[in-house]
Image: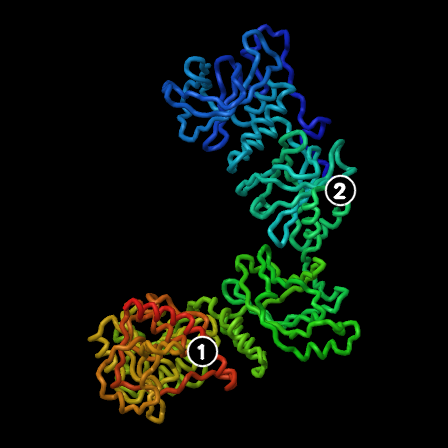
């Protein structure tokens, strides 16, 4: 229904109301009082600030209606170019028959100026400035009253000049004020419809709108853009005489947020007009707008391109699944959809389209979309094939392509609109769209990748392609997470200044921390050292009470730190260092145990001679073979650019070595400056296991100014990184993924360093 509130123009058949008439019997029409309450005098001009760089000047007299040269003030050398329009006064006299309006570029002009001249010095006409600038409403009233029946044409010429080129918000506000004061308001906008692609649908009524294209700009708390826009009209029997309904689609870069829109300035059939947003407007969301468009689509008349755009908008996503309604053997399903940080998406599912009716497949959210059928990885899904095998209507044709039905895809969509619905858009060869909403699961990139890999049959021939083209890119685009400390509890008298604290990062096993505490209590050095135990919040809730009891029983000085998230050992080590303010810390993974007492003192004594460096002991297996004894750069091995030279050797091969410079330390156990992790930028995201993640961090620490050393005289027992709940096949796949991520990140860097050396 039409809103009954009307603009001032709605009470007359003309879009511009007739101005007041000056009494023709007046012997001298100047000075005369106009409706604006200001006198226009011969020889004087009135200024109106349009924006920061433009001044509107109104006066009486004959000035050529074209670009002229102006002189400002007493300095005759100051000249400017100006647009001028003039008119014959509605009530003239022998002394003055014309009025004029000029637009003057006045960016650096002194507004306290007193005179202005039009034309060259010899033939110039001089005017005195009125001491006070007039508001736009008063300037419009002066033009309308003095120009009479010519006011429409005069204002249109002025507005054509004002709406050309770049328009800022202040200029557009002045234009709106001019139109309102000149009674050029025309109709109302009653519906503002939002869309998924960012375009804004406007619907209302007006007298001046005509089907086709017109210049227009949205008014409101948005950056104005003057551009051509398609207009379609439709019958509105409830509109005032001469009024008709109109609709238009305004691009995202022209409209801004729907609640900020206040009106529309447009050049209609009779010139520039203003349609305000009605006080009882309705704002329709992206899921509601298509229905509003469909309700008037068959009655609209307009340019073909706009009608096609309206048709596309009418058939856009409404939050419903429509694939199952297609009259073709086309069906689709989603098995899982994960979103990690920054709009990083990993989606797996199936598409049954044996006769290839689908032309494109896109994943969309708000005004962002990514085409998937050119980048996804397809694989066999026998369960999908079997489910449609006995359905006659879905049997493939004789010429059908037997494509694998399963798919997995990695995609990136902006995360600013994370609350907007995510959906698949399938476009058929006949341009018909179909939609499938996607329910997202928020997860870390590591969790999402592990769950997706675990859902795929390891014997699938497409697994290498899935890893290379989907999983690895998905993980590489994930950002490293910074642990957030949730709770800090002290057991006993904790003094981090007594000696460098031992920071223990709890691993995935619930029990591995308890024997380590017993061994630390048996060593006289570590029993007196402050100990920080950092663990994920869930484990903290289960074990904090028991750990506090053990710390009191053993007489340890302990601080328990709870960090949000699941977290691996390196994230827990980082959380533990965040809970301290001392200069030096000793990191220790909960999966390691000291080979003998006195390791703590030896590590710190050597670290004191190598200040600002990171010092790691040797890590060994229980069979006295070396698990890790430093990382070295291998210049001749492109597949493994960083290697451990002594892995597998007996311990006695290195025990007599002196502290040795290495390429990267191991943070499983080391003495280091507490600030080292923050200088290196924290932990890298993307790794599924601990080995390459620790190596990546060690290399970045070395390149952040912290030299790495190996101390062979100190050894720790430990096993390889254990992945609890992961099969051997899955573990091998995880190791391969981590190696590929590490090589892709570090091989170019190490190669460039080698060339520059």
Residue topped by disc 2: 1
Disc nearest the viewer among 1 and 2:
1
State the image coordinates of residue 593 (x, y, percent, origin top left): 35, 86
Q: Quadrant of the C terminus?
A: bottom left
Is 369 left, or right, of 746 in this rendering? right
Question: Which of the 4 image quarters holds residue 370?
Answer: bottom right
CA distance separating discs 1 and 2: 63 Å
Residue topped by disc 1: 689
10 Å neighbourhood of mark 1: few (<14), some, or many (≥20)?
some
Is 320 left, or right, of 645 in this rendering? right
10 Å neighbourhood of mark 2: few (<14), some, or many (≥20)?
few
Q: Secondary structure at mark 1?
A: loop
Q: Quadrant of the N terminus?
A: top right
Which residue is nearer to you in this view: 113 or 673?
113
Q: Secondary structure at mark 2?
A: loop
User: Which residue shows up at 47% across the image and 71% down it?
Assistant: 565
Above or below residue 420? Residue 697 is below
Is 251 left, or right, of 666 in this rendering? right
User: Which residue shows up at 49% across the image and 18% down it?
Assistant: 45
Question: Which of the 4 image quarters holds residue 458?
Answer: bottom right
Question: Which of the 4 image quarters holds residue 649?
Answer: bottom left
| Mark toward the start of the polypeptide (1 vs 2) | 2
State the image coordinates of residue 334 (x, y, percent, origin top left): 64, 70
């Amino acid at each position: 229904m039409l809103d009954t509130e009307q603009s001032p123009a709605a009470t007359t058949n003309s879009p511009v109301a007739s101005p007041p008439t000056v009494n023709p019997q007046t012997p001298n029409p100047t000075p005369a009082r106009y409706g604006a309450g200001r006198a226009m005098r011969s020889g004087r001009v009135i200024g109106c600030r349009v924006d920061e760089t433009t001044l509107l000047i109104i006066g009486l007299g004959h000035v050529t209606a074209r670009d002229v040269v102006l002189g400002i003030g007493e300095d005759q050398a100051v000249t400017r170019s100006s647009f001028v329009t003039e008119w014959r006064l509605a009530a003239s006299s022998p002394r003055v028959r014309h009025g004029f309006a000029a637009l003057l570029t006045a960016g650096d002009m002194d507004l306290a100026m007193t005179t202005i001249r039009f034309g060259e010095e010899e033939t110039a006409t001089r005017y005195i400035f009125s001491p006070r600038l007039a508001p736009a409403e008063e300037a419009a009233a002066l033009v309308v009253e003095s120009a009479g029946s010519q006011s429409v044409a005069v204002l249109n010429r002025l507005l054509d000049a004002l709406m050309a080129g770049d328009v800022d918000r202040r200029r557009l506000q002045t234009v709106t004020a001019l139109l309102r004061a000149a009674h050029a308001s025309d109709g109302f906008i009653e519906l503002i419809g939002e869309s998924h692609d960012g375009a804004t649908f406007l619907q209302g009524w007006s007298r001046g709108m005509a089907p086709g294209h017109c210049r227009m700009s949205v008014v409101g708390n948005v950056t104005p853009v003057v551009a051509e826009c398609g207009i379609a009209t439709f019958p509105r029997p409830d509109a005032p005489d001469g009024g008709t309904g109109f609709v238009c689609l305004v691009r995202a870069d022209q409209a801004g947020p729907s609640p900020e829109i206040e009106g529309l300035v447009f050049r209609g059939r009779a010139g520039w007009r203003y349609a305000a947003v009605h006080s009882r407007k309705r704002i329709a969301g992206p899921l509601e707008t298509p229905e509003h468009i469909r309700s008037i689509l068959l009655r609209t008349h307009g340019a073909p391109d706009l009608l096609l755009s309206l048709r596309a908008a009418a058939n856009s996503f409404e939050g419903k699944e429509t694939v199952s309604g297609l009259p073709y053997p086309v069906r689709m399903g989603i098995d899982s959809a994960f979103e990690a940080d920054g709009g990083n998406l990993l989606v797996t599912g199936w598409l049954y389209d044996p006769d290839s009716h689908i032309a494109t497949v896109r994943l969309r959210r708000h005004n962002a979309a990514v085409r998937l059928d050119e980048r996804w990885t397809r694989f066999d899904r026998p369960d999908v094939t079997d489910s449609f095998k006995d359905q006659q209507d879905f049997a493939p044709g004789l010429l059908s392509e037997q494509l694998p039905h399963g798919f997995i895809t990695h995609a990136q969509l902006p995360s600013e609109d994370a609350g907007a619905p995510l959906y698949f858009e399938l476009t058929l060869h006949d341009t018909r769209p179909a939609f499938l909403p996607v329910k997202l699961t928020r997860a870390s990139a590591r969790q999402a990748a592990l769950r997706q890999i675990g859902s795929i049959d390891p014997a699938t021939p497409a697994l290498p392609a899935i890893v290379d083209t989907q999983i690895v890119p998905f993980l590489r685009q994930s950002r490293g997470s910074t642990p957030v400390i949730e709770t800090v509890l002290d057991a006993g008298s904790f003094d981090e200044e007594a000696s460098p604290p031992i920071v223990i990062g709890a691993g995935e096993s619930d029990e591995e921390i308890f024997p380590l505490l017993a061994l630390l209590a048996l060593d006289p050095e570590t029993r007196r050292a402050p100990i920080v135990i950092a663990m994920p919040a869930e484990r903290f809730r289960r074990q904090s009470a028991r750990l506090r009891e053990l710390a009191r029983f053993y007489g340890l000085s302990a601080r328990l730190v709870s960090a949000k998230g699941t977290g691996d050992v390196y994230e827990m080590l980082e959380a533990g260092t965040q809970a301290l303010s001392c200069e030096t810390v000793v990191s220790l993974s909960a999966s390691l145990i000291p080979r003998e007492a006195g390791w703590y003192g030896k590590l710190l004594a050597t670290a004191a001679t190598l200040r600002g460096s990171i010092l790691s002991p040797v890590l060994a297996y229980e069979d006295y073979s070396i698990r890790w004894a430093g990382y070295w750069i291998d210049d001749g091995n492109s597949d493994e650019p960083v290697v451990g030279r002594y892995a597998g050797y007996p311990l006695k091969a290195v025990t007599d070595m002196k502290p040795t410079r290495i390429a990267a330390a191991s943070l499983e156990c080391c003495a280091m400056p507490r600030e080292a992790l923050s200088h290196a930028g924290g932990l890298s995201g993307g790794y599924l296991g601990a080995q390459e993640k620790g190596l990546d961090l060690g290399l970045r620490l070395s390149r952040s100014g912290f030299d790495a050393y190996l101390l062979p005289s100190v050894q720790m027992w430990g096993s390889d990184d254990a992945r609890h709940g992961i099969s051997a096949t899955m573990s091998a796949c995880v190791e391969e993924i981590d190696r590929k991520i590490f090589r892709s990140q570090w091989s170019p860097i190490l190669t460039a360093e080698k060339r520059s050396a």
